Image (cartoon, rainbow, N blue to C red):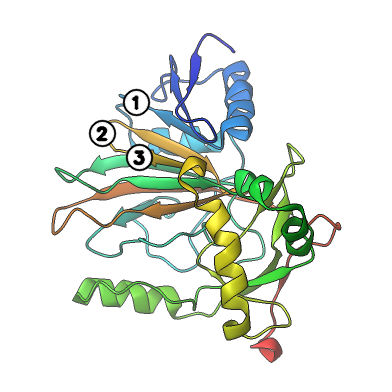
Amino acid sequence: MSGFDVRKAGGRIGAVVTGVDLGGDVPPAVAADLERALVAHKVLAFRDQEITDAHQLAFAGLFGPLTQRHPAMRTVADPQVLAVDGEDQRANHWHTDISFTVTPSLGTTLRSVVLPPYGGDTLVANGEAGYRALPAELREFAGRLTAVHTNRADQPRLGTVRGDEVRRAFMATRYEAAHPVVRVHPVSGEPCLFLGGFARRLAGMTTTESRPILDLLQAYVRRPEHVLRWTWHPGDVLIFDNRNTQHYAVNDYDDHKRVLHRVSITGDLPVGLDGKTSYAVSEEDW
């Protein structure tokens, strides 16, 4: 490593990075080491970072081209920065960011802006560990499946005017993409269960037929030993590899304010074990 320290935060997922100032210029050698650390640990956490949106954009840009605009959400002043505000939405469901598009995000950065006095942790689950935990017969079966992801999947309701407005906007344009249930990581070559709450059904099956199979596979990803639980503090910055993880925002902070700023990195086309790639689902298939 290039003059900084990476310490595991859990046995299966996550690491805390010290010795890197995200408010300054990150040398190319450090950036390369951070990329390797992200692939290895799936989630990297940075404490005590006094940075701005511009710094966060620069940090996310170390890992690839930035997503210009979320396809289904409003943004703050900079269209590349999404304010994740608990008054608008509470993503208390397991999901992989924009997996309802053909090329989901490569990764996501989150920065604490306003934190509640308690609660509001972020959970991140390791899809590679979930895949490795499958019995051999189930692993073989999963490798032949394709899941249809959609933004029309059941979205949690806040029961507030702002929450309902954001929910309607999120679902206004229909997006659907079919992804291999077992995705191969483009860098490490490791297979993972690529699912989450946007995966509504399996190709060739109805939603009702698919649900028990999806729930069974999801249970392996969400095992406690496969999950990092991050408790936010002022100055925290998190980045997770969206290609092999799912995440969940815990809705246990009552009516308190919680705002994180999110910047995402543009992803590539998922590839399955058999080499087949993701594809858009046409209207005829709806």
**Circle nearer the N terminus (1, 3):** 1
Q: CA distance from mark 1 to mark 2?
A: 8 Å
The amino acid marked with disc number 3 is Arg
Residue 283 occupies which quadrant of the picture? bottom right
Q: Is residue 149 visible?
A: no
- Label 3 element class: strand
**Of circles 1 and 3, which is in front?**
1
Can you tell which mark lies on residue 9? none
Whether 43 is drawn above or below 83: the answer is: above
The residue that disc 3 covers is: 111
Near mark 3 (Cα within 10 A), the count class, few <14, some 14-19 or many ≥20, is many
The residue that disc 2 covers is: 233
Q: CA distance from mark 3 to mark 2?
A: 10 Å
Marks 1 and 3 in Cβ contact (< 8 Å)? no
**Circle nearer the N terminus (1, 2):** 1
- Does residue 253 appear left or right of residue 31 in this picture? left
Q: Is residue 157 visible?
A: yes
| Residue found 44% across the figure and 18% down from its top | 20
The amino acid marked with disc number 1 is Arg
Taking the view exactly as shown, the residue that stands out farthest to the bottom is 284
| Residue found 71% across the figure and 78% down from its top | 203
